[in-house]
Amino acid sequence: MENEVKRIGILTSGGDAPGMNACIRAVVRAALGRGIECVGIRRGWSGLINGDIMTMDNASVSRIINRGGTMLYTARSDEFRTLEGQKKAAATCKLLGLDGIVAIGGDGTFRGAQELSKHGIAVVGIPGTIDEDIVCTEYTIGFDTAANTAVECIDRLRDTMQSHERCAVVEVMGRYAGWIALTAGMSSGADIILIPELDYDIEAILATIKKRVAAGKHFSIIVVSEGIRHPEGHLVSQRTVKNSPDPIRLGGIGPLLAAELEQRSDIEARSVVLGHLQRGGRPNPFDRILATRFGAAAVAALAEGESGKMVALQGKQIVTVPLKTVAGKQKLVPADHELIQIGRSMGICFGS
Ligand code: F6P
């Protein structure tokens, strides 16, 4: 099958993630190395619909391995969620002579990729999202860097919270899954970690803080995912993601929780929403290597005639898995996750 693939397209879609550029570089250079032409598609699936393309050569991906964001821009496309949009995208592929598409992104990207592959276009997905919520892969591009960024911020906050004897509520990203909160919280020595997968009780949080005060520790660090649910069952956060397939409300739970803690105790609380700060910045070596391995593997998969697949890290190996087993699913933090068990045994409060 090798060499039947002559020309491929590469796009990034959904939220950007540190390491996407390193991945684009790997795809372009691995393709060129196999004698396959590579076309950059700007602004995700909507760029494919509109034929918004750029020629990619070795030089066009120079000096991007260390840069955050995505040189191809990214977007969420409402049109691509329609059959009409998918037909238009497939027609553009045919018009441009593209034998395959490499799509870097999260679950929304893969749902799109799966639909496109049904229109006879070979598609391989690469997991790239700071949320780390893609099934079948141990890591997604960008998560490790984002978690590191969050840890660095929390370390700084600890200094000032300790000095003023305050309680910090740090809201991190994580729409459905608490991977960033769990990882950053455990690595920064947080006292309370709240994730969407576990319900929380404000009384348990207050009790943990009071216990710390009684032990002479007049400051506390609470790390909270943006996607946590209010104990009454509704989402209390403020923001919605435009053009997202899921009308979930995001962001703003941190400030609400800080206000509630102040109201219900004599604790002085401050909230910090890390927000998009976590998505920007230079990818760390782990993400650069993961991105490079994923990029090369995606090109190899297309060259070998694979389609409707996602590259994934399983153990130490990069493998391909069918998109149909990935798309529409979420890798959530299990309630009995080892880190939660260890954390509980060390007195960390996970909301109850
Ligand atoms: O990329 C995933 C993600 O970062 C989520 O954690 C977050 O909820 C969402 O994207 C934010 O999206 P937007 O960039 O549209 O604000």
Image: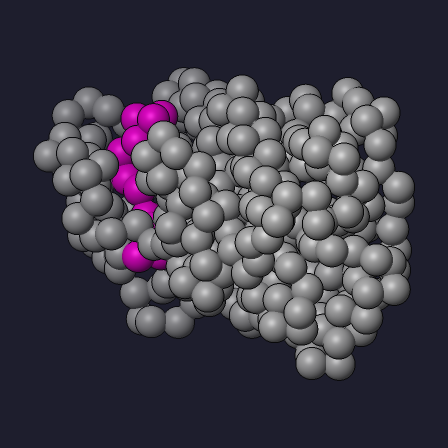
- Residue 79, horizontal then vertical, whole percent: 74, 73
Q: Please tell me which residue is depicted at 77% across the width and 47% down the height of the picture.
A: 6
- Residue 208, horizontal then vertical, whole percent: 20, 40
Query: Going by the image, does 59 lie left or right of 207?
Result: right
Does any portion of residue 61 appear in the rendered image?
Answer: yes
Q: Please tell me which residue is depicted at 70% across the width and 54% down the height of the picture.
A: 100
Q: Is residue 51 magenta?
A: no
Above/below status of 6 relative to 114? above
- Residue 34, horizontal then vertical, whole percent: 70, 33
Query: Going by the image, does 305 lie left or right of 139?
Result: right
**Colour logic:** one colour
Above/below status of 112 relative to 100? below
Query: Going by the image, does 285 lie left or right of 213?
Result: right
Q: Please tell me which residue is depicted at 87% across the width and 64% down the height of the picture.
A: 95
Magenta segment range? Answer: 185-197
Of residues 24 and 77, the one nearer the viewer is 24
Of residues 253 and 291, the one nearer the viewer is 291
Q: Please tell me which residue is depicted at 30% across the width and 50% down the height of the picture.
A: 333
Does any portion of residue 271 appear in the rendered image?
Answer: no
